[in-house]
Amino acid sequence: MDEQGNADDDIDGQRTRRHEAELPLDHHPHIATFPLRTAGAMIDEIVSEQNGYQSYGEKMSEDGVSCVWAPFTSHIDYEVARWAKLRGQGSTAFSDLLNIDGVCERLGLSYRNSRELNHIIDSKIPARRPRFRRQEILVAGEAFDVYFRDILQCVKALFGDPELAPHLVFAPERHYSNEDKTQRIYHDMYTGDWWWHTQKRLENEKPGATIIPILLSSDKTQVTMFRNKSAYPIYMTIGNLPKEIRRQPSRNAQILVGYLPTTKLEHITNKAARRRCLANLFHACVRHIVEPLIVPGKDGMSIASGDGVLRRGHPLLACYIGDYPEQLLVTGMKTGECPKCDIPSTELGSKDLPFEMRDLDQILHALALVDEDPTQFTKACRDAGIKPLYHPFWEGLPHCNIYNAITPDVLHQIYQGLVKHLISWIKSAYGEAEIDARCKRLPPNHNIRLFMKGISVLSRVSGTEHQQICRFLLGLIIDIRLPDGASPVRLIRAVRGLLDFLYLAQYPCHSDLTLELLSGALNRFHDNKSIFVDLGIRSSFNLPKLHSFRHYVTMIRMFGTTDNYNTEYTERLHIDLAKDAYRATNHKDEYMQMTLWLERREKMLWHDKFIQWRLHNGAAPAHVPQSRHPLPHSDLVYLRQSKLTKDPSVKRVTFASLAEQYGAVHFQAAVARFVVQVTQPDLTARQSEEAACHVNLPFQSVVVFHKVRYSTVGDDGMLNNVTVDAIHARPARRDCHNRKVPARFDTALVNLGNGGKMGVEGYRVAQVHVVFSLSANVKRALFGNVNVPDHLAYVEWFTPFTAPDINHGMYKVSRALYDGDRQSSIVPIRNVRRSIHLIPKFGTVAPREWTTSNVLDRCSTFFVNNFTDRDAYVTVF
């Protein structure tokens, strides 16, 4: 078989298509608003005279206390209480601290222990979110406790939060990448088809509706390391909030609405009966939580946003977020089946076998027979393809199709699913020893975790670790031989296809064209996956998680990009709302204590916002009209800015030390050439070289910086303090334990002056050896009145980019030499766009003398790694 001829397309064609697909994402979208003005409209233009803070302040003033820190007596009194509830080590430790003689008196505290502080919070601080209640749920003659909140009050609390009011979206929109409005763009939930179509149905029935999409998520989690104690929280948020806010725990845009029972029903010996009882228990509990949504979902309810504007809101269940076992539990499907469609379990690995989404009407008709003859009910459920559930929670919810509501799960379906399988298959194909040897010899990079013991020794590998392995996985296997001389082309294409799918699936903004790229990446994996069967590693690919990839495009069109409903956010919530809550208890009757701890914590969080509002003279948050739209791709291409420390790492480094310790052998010549390029830019290359020979440098040393950090720049132009990238250029040293730390000189992507946001045109790879600055006197002597950047870098070049490989898609570079010496230059730090990771061309066997610290010097050829992060993936293609 001519494998080269079977390539999907020539490499230039692939690059052109991808460039054309991603380029529109760099521009503001063309927006089509919902055609009916009644959608999301205010009720008779009614605006409440009070916002959320003002009504809260009225409740606070009922006691007649006017102190800004009320109910606390002073700033210190309040700050200590805030620390105790949001940062403290526990009630007993706090009480012990206050029991120290003189502490309360000297600080002027109005409480002397945790009990008194709790009494103040419970009795004098109003609750913004509803309290938890305990309810007994009877299933199969046995009672179980479920702790839950009024979900309608939770919706009103989120919708009415004045901090979130400027960000709320009240009506769907369609975004396009072209003026003709033929190419759709999808990002936030309100740009998807579900909101638009549901809005249209509601407007036909009862004009003036404001849809409040409810996103539920649940996941059982361990709250102890050794006692096997678990909790089963269920969370909710609303789709009116942008995804950037929903995914930030600090914005408190997710609410814990309940703790479900964690019983395993081990007293039921029959496994089928036990599973059936567990499913019915789950649905009975969740039904009790979501039941209040039924009436307002149909008829609407008056609801005020945080700026006091009243609307007729319809809270509708839009998405249910969970891993595969949770999806089966919610939908009533069997293990090994797709929870969304009717594809046979024996065809889950098919690339293009047709399927139909599950027929909700048929399923609801079967479930309606639950009170009839049990045999007839069981048969009807079997014919409909569902387990015989007793009134599932979604049965009566308006405008809810639970099989459409099940969303993609990047964490468990990709990282903990197919990526986990892929790594296992690769280790079986190539052998663990060689894979581990290559892992130990990768050069360092800010975005790469070095597994110095290899990856085969890892156990209980987390999703984060699988994500880190994906960043260099393809580069490891490029030139390893397969057993019996088999061609590795299909295996490399399969890995590349799956990695492309992984990165494209996580784009924060998609167009119709990028969704075609997503489908194409999946097809490449399917077209080449048979290599694992030929190698005897797999016999079939009937994996539910692999089949779920076929639903990604549809779901992105329906609900927006996958970062709207990522289970990673749920995993993060477990820390604050389950594990920390459990640690605050005495582990006896823990749920009563956990819910009370959470209520007090939420009260203090809200009260802190109220105090900050009051300190700023009670300025009400202004209502922001919905015509304001930031770029939807905000983090597809990072706008980043370099940042160096105020003081240099070394204040004086001589030319000799630069050559010996930093490897800057041609530093003086490079500076001379840079002076000529800046002061005489019109000279030819030969003339520049001749002129550089006559440049005299009026200095013998420079100040040096060992690290350049990169932070993102927000849409508002403000610099974010989070470091997203860094470049190290430091010599060997001794640490605090007198151990030798090898030198590190990172490689970077340098803009030659005409580089764009996407693609490698106008860029070149270089190794940064010295980051330095020149004094004002030196710059004046060398450059006169020409403006020269404050920070410069001495770099050694690699060869220019050529065409990437047609199979693995990576660019190959090597050291750029001139008369046997490495080519070097001085470049402004502002031209160094980002760090870049190079993967050595190991050959069939990794040389054992190579190490992570010397591989950049000993290896002659490298592959440019474009999987280190999304910015590299978008740039280096």
Image: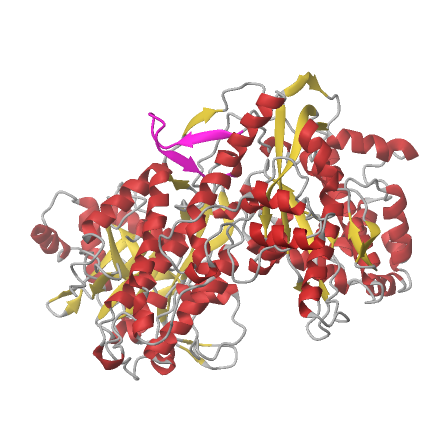
Residue sitting at 79 percent across and 42 percent down? 130
Left/right of residue 504 with respect to residue 316 in the rendered view: left
Give whichever of 53, 498 is nearer the camera.
Answer: 498
Q: Nearer the viewer, residue 810 or 109?
A: 810
Is 629 placed above or below 229 here? above
| Residue for point 73% across, 35% down | 615
| Occupied quadrant, residue 869 | bottom left
Residue 700: tell me if it is visible.
Answer: no
Q: Is residue 321 visible?
A: yes
Q: Which residues are magenta?
A: 172-188
Label count reads 0
Report the side of 56 relative to 341 (left or right). Answer: right
Looking at the picture, does residue 441 appear above or below residue 503? below
At 29% across and 67% down in the image, what residue appears? 491
**Membership of 186 in magenta stretch:** yes
Q: Is residue 649 left or right of residue 369?
A: left
Above or below: residue 482 compared with residue 690: below
Q: Which residue appears at 33% of the width and 66% of the height?
A: 474
Percent of width and height locating residue 716: 49, 36
In the image, 709 versus 228, the foreground residue is: 228
